[in-house]
Amino acid sequence: DAGITQSPRHKVTETGTPVTLRCHQTENHRYMYWYRQDPGHGLRLIHYSYGVKDTDKGEVSDGYSVSRSKTEDFLLTLESATSSQTSVYFCAISDRPGLEGYTFGSGTRLTVV
Amino acid sequence: GESVGLHLPTLSVQEGDNSIINCAYSNSASDYFIWYKQESGKGPQFIIDIRSNMDKRQGQRVTVLLNKTVKHLSLQIAATQPGDSAVYFCAEINQAGTALIFGKGTTLSVSS
C-alpha cells in the first residue's frame, strides 16, 4: 500500500529467538498500529503508538514489545518467539483514528518453528 | 468489554445478486464504524465508514446501515461481482477513540 511498508514480508524463525518486524510510513501520520491476524480471530490489536516514544498496549500484547523513535518507523519485537506467535502481522497508520480509517500495510507472515 | 462480531463466517452469492453482510457490536457508546475488504494475501482496504449520528451511508455500489437500537451494522453490496470475493470486516472505534476493534470477518464468495 502506498505510504506504508512492512519488512520483512516473510520470515521463518526458531522458538526462543528474538524477532523484530518493521513498519515504515511516509505519510507523517501520528498513529501507528500492530495487529495480528489468525484464522477464526480476525484482526487483534497488539500495540499502538500515538507519537514518538508514546505507545500503549492492545488486547494481545503479552510477549511483544514496540518502539517508536521516529515518526516514520514503528518496530514490533518478539523477545523470545513461541509457536503461538506464528501469525500474519499487519501494520496500520492513521492521522485521526476516530474520524477516518486506517491504511494497512501488506503484512508480514511469521512462522515460528 | 468492547467487541465486534459478525453473524456469519461465510456467504455465497451469484454474480449480479445483492449481498448483505451483517455485524453486531457490543459497545453502545461507539460512535464510528468502518467496513474493510481483504483480498487474499493483501492487507485490509477501507470500503466505507459511518458515524453514529447517521443511519445510512452510500458509496459506489455499497451501502452501510447502522441500527443503534439493536447495535447492528450491515454492508450491502449491489450487483455483486466476482471481484467482490474477499473477506469483509467490520470495525468500531474503541472508547478512547484511539484504535479500531475488528470483528472476525465474513468470507464472501461470488460465483459466475
Image (tube, rainbow, N blue to C red):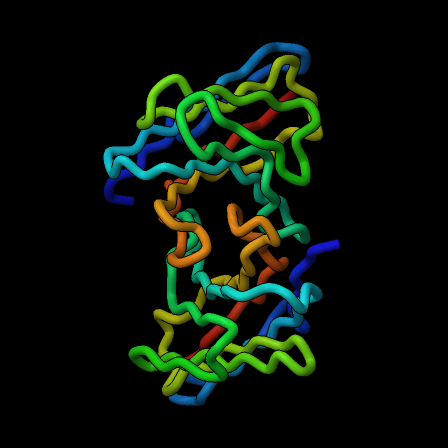
Quadrant that contains the C terminus of chain A: top right
What residue do we see at 46% from left, 70% from top? B51
Above or below: residue A64 compared with residue B95? above
Q: Residue at x 61, y 70 (%)?
A: B10
Residue B71 vs residue A31: left or right?
right
Res. A6 image quadrant: top left
Task: Tell me what residue is drawn at x 40 percent, y 30 percent.
Answer: A9
State the residue lying farthest toward the top: A17
Q: Nearer the viewer, residue A69 or B29?
A: B29
Quarter containing the N terminus of chain A = top left
Q: Is residue A17 above or below residue B81?
A: above
Above or below: residue A30 compared with residue A64? below
The answer to which image quadrant residue B67 occupies is bottom right
Q: Residue at x 68, y 22 (%)?
A: A63
Residue B92 in which image quadrant: bottom right
Q: Position of residue B88 (x, y in %)?
A: 50, 64
- The x and y percentages for residue B97 are 53, 51
Q: Position of residue A45 (x, y in %)?
A: 59, 41
